[in-house]
Image (spheres, helix red, strand yellow):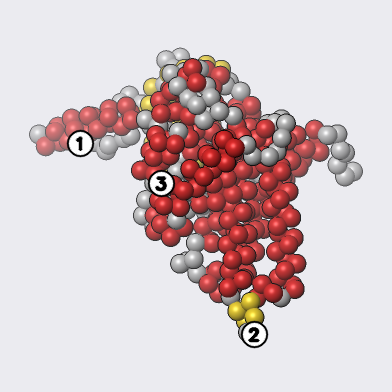
Amino acid sequence: MTLLYSDVEEELRAAVRGLLADRCPPAAVLRRVESEPYDLGLWKTLAGEIGVAGLLVPEELGGAGASASEAAVVLEELGRAVAPVPFFTSAVLATYALLPTRDALLGELAEGRRTAALAVSFAASPYRPERGASLSVDGEGRISGEVTGVAGADVADVLLAPVNGDLYAVDVTAAEEGAAEKGAVTEGAAEEGAGGGAEARGGAPGGVAVEVVPSLDLTRPVATVTFDRASARRLGACDLAGVLRPAAGLLASEQLGVAEWCLGTTLSYVKERHQFARPIGSFQALKHRLADLWLDVVRARAAARNAAADPSAVSVAVAQSWNAGVAVHAAEEAVQLHGGIGMTWEHPVHLFLKRAKAGEIALGTPGDHREALASLVDVPGPE
């Protein structure tokens, strides 16, 4: 196993970085968060022309048959741009859940024709996978319950709901069409004086409600998903902890990308910003801070690459316990070393700080992963 990047990975990086530089500069992301965060046009290009949506899907199922290392490179670049696209939620989380089922939906996701979201709270972890969810399925195969903090649900065509060790697919677009038809009927009845009714997403007799809630990360909204006897299709068994573990390992690559942008942008700024007739980057105190940060980022790169190549419990716990904090530290240093301009809304550095802070508590906090790591390597805790 090597932690170095292959030529194929570097070519993939160049393609993704070039597209993001053209279509998704920080200023454009900042404008989008004030209206509609997700850039689905960009996602269609990434998925359809570069093929990132199908990296983890085997070739025989319509994907690229690549490895997690290629997906990690894409996540580094998306983190570097805080790109508002559902790659992590659809092409990683949802895809990992679907892979054991080998369902035909994988081909549709790989082609970018549809997107999916795993109905699991971003606050869940491989150690507490059910956190934030209370779902049940009745004898008719209909799902009821609520999941809080679901990322990517507001733009998903299909919601994947893990219930009691099984995975179910809820077609949100079909549910919306049913709700629209029902709304048209009730509206007509109301005009005739027969009474009316409120439109419910999902249609009768059950449905799905996706309510976007305030999120610290403006580029990755989260939502509360409520199932009310929603029609669902059983896909197969689902080991939820086994899905969240490799996904958490790949999240470390996104955190690496955030940290790299913050370090690179700050280095450029301290070389240009002058104080007392000299660049502020020439002051020894700042040199030491940035040198320490560079070492942190290098270690984060090694941890992220290792977790992508070997998504074992130990590798993932190491990567998440380190990279989450490095991303936050790098973003905080970027804000401080940019001085007054770093505190403004107009400068995009706050988007990276918010992504880093939100990612720090996603799929397990650093404390969760350190505790798990101590147990895995048999290091006793304090008495």
Q: How far apart are marks 3 and 2 (CA)?
A: 43 Å
Earlier along the polypeptide chain: callout 3 or callout 1? Answer: 3
Tell me the element at label 2. Answer: loop
Residue drawn at the location 48% of the way across and 25% of the way down: 63
| Left or right: residue 48 compared with residue 360 | left
Q: What residue type is labelled 1?
A: Gly
| Left or right: residue 344 compared with residue 292 | left
Q: Which amino acid does label 3 sit on?
A: Tyr
| Left or right: residue 202 compared with residue 47 | left
Earlier along the polypeptide chain: callout 3 or callout 2? Answer: 3
Which residue is farthest left? 192
Question: x and y percent of residue 45 in the render?
Answer: 39, 40
Is label 3 in contact with label 1 (beta carbons under 8 Å)?
Answer: no
Tell me the element at label 1. Answer: loop
Marks 3, 1: nearer the viewer:
3
Quick one: 214 or 43, which is closer to the camera? 43
Q: Which amino acid does label 2 sit on?
A: Phe
Question: x and y percent of residue 164 in the render?
Answer: 57, 21
Residue drawn at the location 27% of the way across and 27% of the way down: 178
Tell me the element at label 3. Answer: loop
Query: Is there any visible trace of residue 226 in the rendered image?
Result: no
Q: Residue 276 bears which disc, if any?
A: 2
**Viewport quadrant of the N terminus:** top right
Earlier along the polypeptide chain: callout 1 or callout 2? Answer: 1
**Around disc 3, counting alpha carbons within 10 Å, would you say few (fewer than 14), some (14 to 19), or many (20 or more)?**
many
Q: What residue is pinned by disc 3?
A: 38
Which residue is farthest bottom? 276
Q: What residue is pinned by disc 1?
A: 196
Quick one: 30 or 47, which is closer to the camera? 47
